[in-house]
Amino acid sequence: MTANIPKNIRVRFAPSPTGPLHIGSCRTALFNWLFAKNQGGEFILRIENTDVERSKKEYEDGIVEGMKWLGLDWDEFYRQSERLDIYEKYLKQLLDEEKAYYCFCSKEELEADRQAMLSQGIAPKYGGRCKKFSKQESEEKINKGESAVIRFKMPLKEIEFHDMIRGKVKFNSELIGDIVIAKNLKEPLYNFGVVVDDYEMKISHIIRGEDHLANTPKQIAIQEALGFENVKYAHLPLILTPDRRKMSKRYLDVALEDYRQNGYLAEAIVNFTVFLGWHPVDDREILSLEDLIKEFDIKRVQKAGAVFNVDKLDWLNSQYIKKMDASELALKIKNFIPSQWQSDEELLIKAIGAEKERMRTLAEFKDLAGFFFELPNYEKNLLIWRDAAPEKIIENLKMIAMELEKIDEMMFNKKDLEQIIMPLTEKYGVGDLLWPLRTALSGKQASPGPFEILEVLGKKESLKRIEIAINKLQNK
Ligand code: GLU
């Protein structure tokens, strides 16, 4: 083992582009990014696309796009498919030093071995049949066109490492066996590519999901065989559903893109994901990226599974929406509303202002605020407050229309309207007056208050809607 020379802090996020960017992967990216920023280190994005059949460019684009959207920028970018010569060099080194060998076993032979081991109650692993061929023999077989993979000669020993989150972790490599590290010199597999890249890219800390824990001893053994120095590890806890199952597509939306399309803000997603296994020292729940950079400490990451709670995400999202300016929200909300609503920018901003407190996601705006842009369609019974007589409601609406008529356009704002109209409720009753007014304007069981709506709609439109309501009640 080579001595550990202190290195600059360099971490990487190494997704395989075999599917949409998963929330769990976003967390891995975020923890690496925060660790780098907090420590003044570098953050590398490495696309692990050596699996040609499953890797797709569109998924790579989605990852890049998602990272940018979250605000997680990188210092260096690599694609494994552009580094095949580098892997080949190290594969040859292992073959030359007889630390790896060609394996010619057929699928059927391997399957028969596996079954035999299982029937004896042994955990299946490769039995080492092809280890007997000398380098020369193997090369002759290859030259004759026999197909082969490259296996790593796993040293038989205990492999121990220190995990920054889990403490001391030990594996017995005898259970692992000689793993396949490449399909051929030009097609390295995951465990090998990672080791070579982490070394070549001078990675100091590997921060990744706990699902990779079992790969770590394999990677350490390969590092040692190649004479690479050790790297530090941190394995992040599993993400669980509220009923404590492993999170998967079956239980919840897991793709970042789904959340984005449903109107979650990047700030809220970042804030939410960081809590999947990490907490600040105090009980604050809203932390910006800047706060997180200052405070992130990998030692505070928990070992136990982290529960993914969508209600918490909704709550956080609504907090970020409330904090945001209506004009800033207007830019973000554009993708969630019909294009004709966008033609009156002023109305849009006012409507957002009125609904901001009630929205949990940007997508909800469309249902909540439609009545600001289009005449509402509703049953006349909605206008009736409790068991009030329809005649009384008609009277009240007529009275309020007359009052509003008198009010100068300049005074058509929530505060002034409230001051003028509230005293009338003493005589006419709060519910009997404000309920029909609000429902006439919104056509909705629940909405912002009547004064807010009056301000957004303005005098002319408000009077028009009150008239429509009166006509409905009079069956006109
Ligand atoms: N490419 C691997 C994955 O997507 C991650 C590799 C690693 O972090 O070591 O799961």
Image: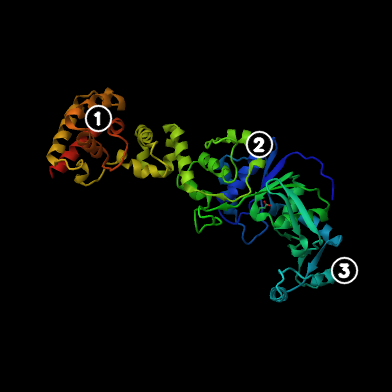
Please name whichever residue, 462 or 273, is drawn nearer the observer in this view of the structure: 273
Image quadrant for the C terminus? Answer: top left
The count of marks equals 3
Q: How crowded is mark 3: few (under 14 residues within 10 Å), some or many (20 or more)?
A: few
Residue where numbered disc 3 is placed: 136
- Circle 2 residue: 37
How far across and down, in percent of the image, does residue 114 sit?
70, 73
The secondary structure type at the circle numbered 3 is helix
> Disc 3 versus disc 1: distance between alpha carbons?
92 Å
Q: Is residue 108 visible?
A: no
Q: Where is residue 388 in the image (x, y as percent from the top left)?
A: 16, 40
Query: Taking 63 as reference, is 196 left or right?
Result: right
| For residue 144, side relative to residue 255 (left or right) | right
Q: Is residue 198 visible?
A: yes
Image side of residue 270 versus residue 393, left or right: right
- Which of labels 1 and 2 is toward the front? 2
Are circles 2 and 3 on residues that touch, CB within 8 Å?
A: no
- Tell me the amino acid under the disc marked 3: Gln
* Nearer-the-camera pick, 112 or 337: 112
Task: Say above or below: 367 vs 424.
Answer: below
Please determine whether, in this image, residue 304 is positioned above or below residue 325.
Answer: below
The amino acid type of the residue labelled 1 equals Lys
Earlier-in-chain disc, 2 versus 3? 2
Residue located beneath label 1 in the image:
459
The image quarter containing residue 115 is: bottom right
